[in-house]
Amino acid sequence: MSVITFICAGQMASAITFPAMENGHEVRLVGSPLDREIIDGLKKDNFHITLKRTLHDGIKYYQIEELEEALEGADAALCGVSSFGLDWFCDEILPVIPESVPLLSVTKGMVDLDDGTLVPYPVIFEERQPEGKNLDINAIGGPCTSYELADHDHSHVAFCGKNMETLKMFKDLLATDYYHITLSKDVVGVECAVAMKNAYALGVTLAVGLSEKMEGKIGIQHYNSQAALFGQSVKEMTKLLQLIGGGPENIVHGAGDLYVTVFGGRTRKIGTLLGRGLSFDEAMEELQGVTLESIVIATRTARAVRKLADRGVVSLDEFPLLMHVDSIINEGAEVNIPWDDFTMIKE
Amino acid sequence: MSVITFICAGQMASAITFPAMENGHEVRLVGSPLDREIIDGLKKDNFHITLKRTLHDGIKYYQIEELEEALEGADAALCGVSSFGLDWFCDEILPVIPESVPLLSVTKGMVDLDDGTLVPYPVIFEERQPEGKNLDINAIGGPCTSYELADHDHSHVAFCGKNMETLKMFKDLLATDYYHITLSKDVVGVECAVAMKNAYALGVTLAVGLSEKMEGKIGIQHYNSQAALFGQSVKEMTKLLQLIGGGPENIVHGAGDLYVTVFGGRTRKIGTLLGRGLSFDEAMEELQGVTLESIVIATRTARAVRKLADRGVVSLDEFPLLMHVDSIINEGAEVNIPWDDFTMIKE
């Protein structure tokens, strides 16, 4: 039995309390400042108001002010901050986590630097921890939606980090007969592959809306066009992975994660609305209040690729889908898939 | 305007008459011995009884006895024989096609040789043409279901062959604003990538039936497990592609084609039935009368991989999903996904 402190009580972190509790650990779930109502609800009856599932009995719940108490004697910490809480987490939380507590982050994302370099969150965490501090920072990638994990659907994810011993420890803590875990030391490869898929899932789901528009009926699905965009996404993601310096085998995590993202949640919704012909502003209005990591990641990735193209490292022609998604989001362009830019001649 | 003779009037070949007719060509559609009723129906009112679509007015229809007449003056031929008609096509049809008529094959498949080599159909056609004959044989790969092509959904496919000039000619004949065509000289890469997906689509769709079984309700879908199997499929397909000698970039066609195959047709049906707990024999009984390329290709690919493993070229551990699918089909094994064989440690 180990003590695991979960920092942030969003859907994904909270879903991981299922394998953690079923493996017999002491689970302490700490809400972020934005999770106050979630924690209040959980304290009442274990029901998680955004995950919409009842968590296991026995979890200890904490508000953010009680974080230090929740970290006392912890063997490991799991962090599920959203992309939008990145600064808060780096400035307020990283200083508080003891070096003796290895960290596993479930947040998928990348930040683009001025020279076009894309850096995944675990690397950002390392760089932004207080000077001289040496936290053991690890991360989870791969296809896994929180609802289905909570429902015990089989899920296969990758834990990545610098130290194989820590990764094995985390796998021992959390692996169950439905939560399957691959270990990898290629942090950049795993995390970039699974971060990019958010941008491309938006691209693939444009076809969902486009066929509804073509057929004049919501709910009608065509798969040829989705598959064409899926294939193009895998092609561009493979190229990006190469640019970023991740191993090409990580496309496996990226493709799986793209698959699951296409079929669920907010990214599919925005892609579908845009495909139906709504402008980006209209689509965002329909989705008011939801945080859209896909928009953030598409913007950052496109910005990075443009900078790399300016530097002559890459040609924009190799990323027609990413560029189109970016132009829809950031330049008010209409959806008009650049199909002919996808075709190529390979002698 | 060119004259294109379509040999075999199955769903896929017949769907390609849409771009061909819309590009203004003379289209001659010749039924195989198994397509007699299809041709009879088309002659009556242009309605294709298995594609369930009305073809364009003006197509000329022929029964197989009229093949030579249909080939007179043809500029190109398109062949849509099913896997099960391979011998017939090689023995009866290849001798009749003039060398001056380049051939484009839509049949996806591979044959395994005694030493474990997997050979795609266009290569088989080349080898089995009459001695001394030198047909210009090309093929189509990539995600494209016939119904959706007939409905003008955007589709992106690859035409592959040895001669770029012929490929460009075929692209000129058939490309439209919805039928998008990439050209490639990597015949083995393209064709093997898209043939393998049939086996793996069966593997992915096991999860469809498994979640229905888990939830006790047909139609309930979980995507984490599908995505895990999808990722594993991409991993194994990438390895197979490498073994077979196809360029790794062809995984783009394989992944796109896997995506579209997971969402439609008979392969999804058999995978789902097996996932629900039916034995292979029971599942086949439910699907009586349908031809299942996925079964053929899974069996052939697994047999080839076993032979390669016997020869020490590869380890069976690298193909746990393929081996499981094969054991379900050919050894009466129950569905029991080898999840833990998918996880790995990558130092």
Image (cartoon, coloured by chain):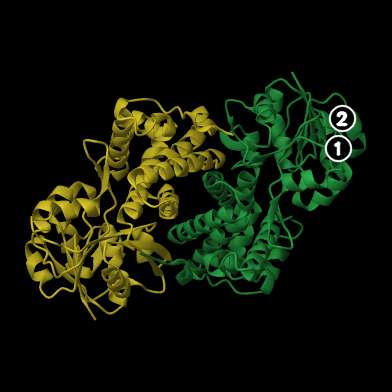
Chain colours: A yellow, B green
Residue drawn at x 68%, y 65% as measured from the top left: B303
**x and y, in percent, of residue A340 in the image:** 52, 28
At a point 43% along the width and 45% down the height, the residue shown is A238
Q: Position of residue A110 (x, y in %)?
A: 27, 46
Which of A217 and B260 lies nearest the eye of the viewer? B260
Badge 2 marks a residue whose secondary structure is helix
Residue B268 seen anywhere in this rendered image of the structure: yes
Q: Is residue B22 shown left or right of residue A122?
A: right
Instruction: Give the image location of residue B36, x and y in percent.
Output: 86, 42
Q: Which residue is mark 1?
A: B40
Which mark, by number, is residue B70? 2
Q: Residue at x 30, y 30 (%)?
A: A311
As drawn, is B123 to the left or to the right of B247? right
Q: Distance of mark 1 from mark 2, alpha carbons?
A: 16 Å
Q: Nearer the viewer, residue B123 or B174?
A: B123
Instruction: Identify the disc placed on residue B270.
Output: none
Mark in front: 1 vs 2: 2
